Image (spheres, coloured by chain):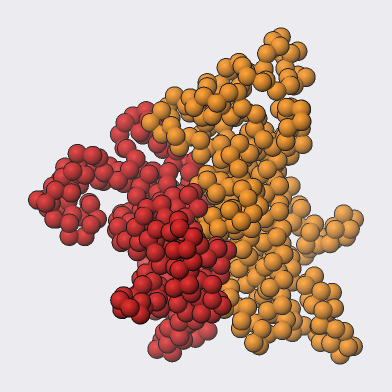
Chain colours: A orange, B red
Amino acid sequence: MASQDTIERKPDAPGRLERLLGPDFYRMLKGLLTNPLSLSGMALLGLFLIVALAAPVLAPPRPNASPYHIPRDGFSPNPKQPGTEWRVRQPPLPFWWKPITHKDHWVHLMGTASGQWDIYYGVIWGTRTAFKVGLIITLSVATLGIFLGSVSAYYGGAVDMVIMRVTDVFMSFPFLLAALTLSAILAPVMGKSLVPPSIALIMFGWMGYARLIRSDILSVKEREYVLAAKVLGATDRRILLKHILPNAIYPTMVVASMDMGSYVLSFAALSFLGVGAEVGYADWGQLISFARDWITNLGQYWFIVIYPGMALVLFVLAWNLVGDALRDILDPRLRGRK
Amino acid sequence: MFNYIMRRLLMIPLLLFGVTVLIFLMLQFLGPTQRSALYVRDIPRNERVLQGVIRKYGLDKPFYVQYWRWLVGVTDEKTGKHEGGILFGQFGYSRTASEPVIDIIKRRFPATFELALWSVLPVILGGVILGVVAAVNHNKFIDQVARVFSILGWSFPTFVFGLLMLMIFYAELRWFPPGRISNWADAVVRSPQFHNYTTMITFDALLNGRLDIFWDAFKHLILPITTLSYLNWALLLRVTRSSMLEVLRQDYITTARAKGLSERRVIFRHALPNALMPVVTIGGMMVVGLLNGVVITETVFNYPGMGKAAADAALNLDVVTVLGLTLFSGTLLIFANLVVDIMYAYIDPRVRLE
């Protein structure tokens, strides 16, 4: 009993753009640009990108200070409400402030957290941190996973056995707890910075990619062109890098790009728990963690949670909107269906 | 089925070995001085005493000797006292809590277990029901709402959601406080008249017939349960929905409808049981995740479970404690996964034959 969906439709003749980009990429791009959810996701991402690029204009850093270090207005433990004026060592005024407000005094646009860290500054520069951390972790995780997975799949036998069992061992740990542990171990060794939590997330994040690329390579490995390359006497490395990987890497790359949001989220979680960068680094998770001192007064000090929290939620949401659309587009079971 | 279980069981020692090796490797980042916390309660300040401890427990020996001693412990030749040995549950001493790590686990695990027990039903049932409703109303308004809800939940960091909950229901309304129990109730629980059967407060309160204590403890659980439910629903809804949609397209569903069965019967009798296969896997993983202590949720709500213990220890760089807790969690996870896998093989015969 054939349902309507299985009736083959004649594909339209490919246009010039489609020929240029290749059918898979073209379909992906077209899907992304016609889906309202992914469009709004991409618009959000564009907005964040602008904020990240324009950070020095939106929130100028103090001269001779690291821009990622949030300026603080004194040391008082009590947070200040949004709109309070800067008192101690005010950073330079952004050029757009005076024409808009006609004041020559900089204010805490989003208030301050305990210890007088300026939340607005942290939110703006935290955008850069989020992109940086997300890109680096995702790229490293995917590279590590792809390397181990492809070696495992290509050589098979004992190598495969060992690598897959190691994968199983790494998967035997609860992800966040393991990452928390490793960052707590690395922090005293390497000093508190973005590096220990990133390494921790990479070390316990690669397993999914390794498994995915492995299964994709196993299916590509038996194709005739690989056999042909072997017969021609190509080296293992050449076969793996030139013939197999390009044909198997696609799904893994897509999954990795969709995971960007969740890595930013995990990183923020580690910062929130206090094993992230040093105190005062422009990082959303850490800003939110300041709220933990004020649980009973959260009604009064809502801005410590709301502003950085909103930035984090929207950032992750943007990636997930794009990722969700990508998944639908690339899911072969849904292909050609409305 | 027997073969499958045997194969799966044979993996266990291998995995346990791997887990211990990995934990041991991470311990090697510490110097011998810090590692002496594996065997002694207080790291000696006196240099000579310290060297004595390091020699006694072989903390300067090659790594395989150290690994073995870490596994089985060291017996004092003079006193015959046995110290250390993770196989005997001796995970070392917590520097920050100044007590054996195993005692922390014994005290904190019931709290985590209690939270997990109360969360399982709302998490699984809620997610599945939402998923079915979304799938049955495919592409209608309800489906779109469910979809947005799911993506939102997926994007919401636990700690932001938790803090929002606290802001509304504690800071503003004063309904549900953080922590595990109020002070007055804690005094009752610690009194000799109150019998601690399970060390899980809600159940003990019921067994003691103290409804006021039960309500107090339950009030503390509501926000963590809500947070865990909402965040897990996002994933469960998505899995149930797509699996249900897949099944609803099958020919046997068309057949069932063609036979003139009611829509309710088609969905609950013919579609749902088949659609639940992937849900079982995800649901199983979720339950296991809950059991393992939900680090962030417990931290946000100041709930004294395993996850909170790990977060506190990590914050104070008390590595021996964190690693002990991680070792416990890893072991628990291995066995819990075994149970889930066997259950799954029981439900879905295809798995056994793989």
In this view, B250 is above or below A73: below
Q: Is residue B5 left or right of residue A110?
A: left
Q: Residue furthest left?
A: B193
Quarter occupied by the N terminus of chain A:
bottom right
State the image coordinates of residue A16 (x, y, percent, origin top left): 90, 55
Which residue shows up at 74% across the image and 68% down it? Answer: A249
State the image coordinates of residue A55 (x, y, percent, origin top left): 73, 32
State the image coordinates of residue B10 (x, y, percent, origin top left): 45, 85
Across the whole image, how many numbered discs are drawn on residues?
0
Which residue shows up at 67% across the image and 68% down it? Answer: A145
In this view, B75 is above or below B161: below
Q: Is residue B254 left or right of residue B291?
A: right
Q: Residue furthest top?
A: A102
State the image coordinates of residue B195 (x, y, percent, origin top left): 13, 55
In this view, A239 is above or below B89: below
Residue A228: which quarter of the image?
bottom right
Which residue shows up at 56% across the image and 21% down it? Answer: A82
Which residue shows up at 62% across the image and 72% down it? Answer: A211
Q: Is residue B116 left or right of residue A124?
A: left
Q: Nearer the viewer, residue B86 or A84?
A: B86
Q: Does residue B240 show up?
A: no
Residue B329: which quarter of the image?
bottom left
Q: Does residue A97 show up?
A: yes
Q: Nearer the viewer, residue B212 or A87?
A: A87
Quarter occupied by the C terminus of chain A:
bottom right
